[in-house]
Every structure is written in structure tokens, then in C-alpha cells.
Image (spheres, rainbow, N blue to C red):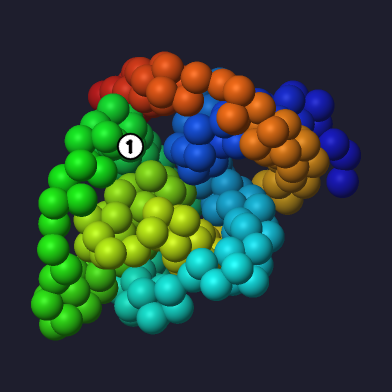
Amino acid sequence: MPIDLLYVVLSACVGLIVGLTGVGGGSLMTPALVLLFNIHPATAVGTDLLYAAMTKSAGTLVHALRSNVAWRVVGLLSAGSVPAAIATLVALSRLGPHNGLTAKTITIVLGFALLLTSLLLVFRRWLLDLRSRRSALSAPREVLLTILTGAVIGFLVSTSSVGAGAIGVTALLLLYPTYSTVRIVGTDIAHAVPLTLMAGAGHWLTGSVDMAMLLSLLVGSIPGIVVGSYLAPRAGERSLRYILALALMVAGGRLAAS
């Protein structure tokens, strides 16, 4: 399969920003493919889901080896996300992957997911402060809210490829205030791998994955993430976060209103 230089450059830029800010690639890659390259929303989402599954597998391995994954929480999230993702994929397949209503639905959900992500970036410090004042939930309530969180993430991810990053991490930070941030991140990444792989496979079965584009995205993202991670300690993370939030807000507003 030929490598497309434009997709390589795009994925390298996305990887760089992910490495600098920690924001999930789906919040950046999918809207860029739709708005800048005019890729059909279903194809953009399906391709990005498989891209995310592959790139996050390595992160899961690293976090698992360092015991930074709460597997019980991963299981609870999956109990909600997997059924929600399957139901969403079935609904989208019945509409038809390239149906006008499917494209409209994906675009609107993607737009609102980006707007939510941008708000979470802006209010991250306030949310962390709120977390520090929270006490642990009762066990039954914790289980129920975690499964419901998984269901919401499963719907968002299978529809827009956005949700398993900033949204998932924020929800887990509030649900599990006694967990360290690195354990929250590791748990979110571990949950994202099977979810994005399953959702991506569902889109692939309906013909909504461009394998040549996927290969080009993978070629560019790896060096981008490495460079971004190396530069992160030297960069003004707070300023970058606000700039990125503004960009996501503009993109989300444009998609939601389309």
C-alpha cells in the first residue's frame, strides 16, 4: 500500500501535540481528516479507531508492566462500553455507513464531543481541585457509575472516536479520587484498546476503514509522539492546553452546526 505524505505529516503533527499535551489523538485526528481532507465522517472515525487501538497497545503494555492499570475498573468500564458500542455499531450499520443521515449523526456527535473535550481542558485545574475535596463513593454506587461511564464512552467512541481520552480520564479522576493520576491514565488507556479495536473492527466490516490511510497515519504518529514527549518538559503546557482547547472549540462548533 502506498504511503501518502500528507497523511504522514498530519499524523506526525497530531502525535507531536499528543506528546506535548497528553490530549487523545481522536480529538485531533478525526476532525482534521473530516475538515481538512474532506474524508467521509464514517471513514475518518473507523480508520482513526484502528489507529488508536494500535498506538495505545504499546502504552497499555508499559502501564501494565509498571502496575499502573486497575484491571477491575477496566472490567467495569467494559461492562458498559462494549454493549453500548455494539448497539451503536448495529444502529449505524442499519443506517448504512455512507448514508447521509449516518454522516450527519457522526458529525454532530463528533462536534459536541470536541466541545466537551475543550471545556474539560479549560477547567482541568478546577476539576482536579474538586477531586481533592471528594471522598470515595460507596461500593455499589461506584460500580454503577463506572458502568454508566463506560456506556457513555462506548457510544461516543464508536460514533466519533472521541471520548476515551480527556473525557474518560476526567470521569475516572472524579470517580476514583484516591487513585494516582498515572493509575487513572493507565486504566483509561487499557480500557481504550479493546474498545477502539472492537469499534474499529465493526467499522471495518461495514467498509468504513481506509487501510492505506491507516498505514500512513501510523508511519507519522510514532516519531511525532516521541518528539512531543521529549519536548513536553520544556514546553508551556498550560498555554498549549488553552490554545488547543480553543482550536477544538472552533472545530467542534463548526461540526455541530453543520
Q: Please tell me whether residue 24 is drawn above or below residue 85 in the rendered image.
A: above
Residue 65 placed where, x, y %?
A: 64, 71
Q: Is residue 196 visible?
A: yes
Q: Quadrant of residue 19?
A: top right
Q: Residues within 10 Å of mark 1 (few under 14, many from 20)?
A: many
Q: Quadrant of residue 96?
A: bottom left
Residue 34 placed where, x, y %?
A: 51, 30
Q: Which residue is mark 1?
A: 117
Residue at x-position 42% and y-position 17%: 239
Residue at x-position 25% and y-position 70%: 146
| Residue type (three-letter) at the residue carrying disc 1 | Thr
- Return the residue nearer the eye: 55 or 94: 55
Q: Secondary structure at mark 1?
A: helix
Q: Is residue 7 visible?
A: no
| Quarter in which the C terminus is drawn | top left
Q: Is residue 160 left or right of residue 214?
A: left
Q: Quadrant of residue 117?
A: top left
- Return the residue nearer the eye: 80 or 121: 121
Residue at x-position 59% and y-position 30%: 232
Residue 185 placed where, x, y %?
A: 45, 56
- Return the residue nearer the eye: 194 or 198: 194
Residue at x-position 25% and y-position 60%: 177
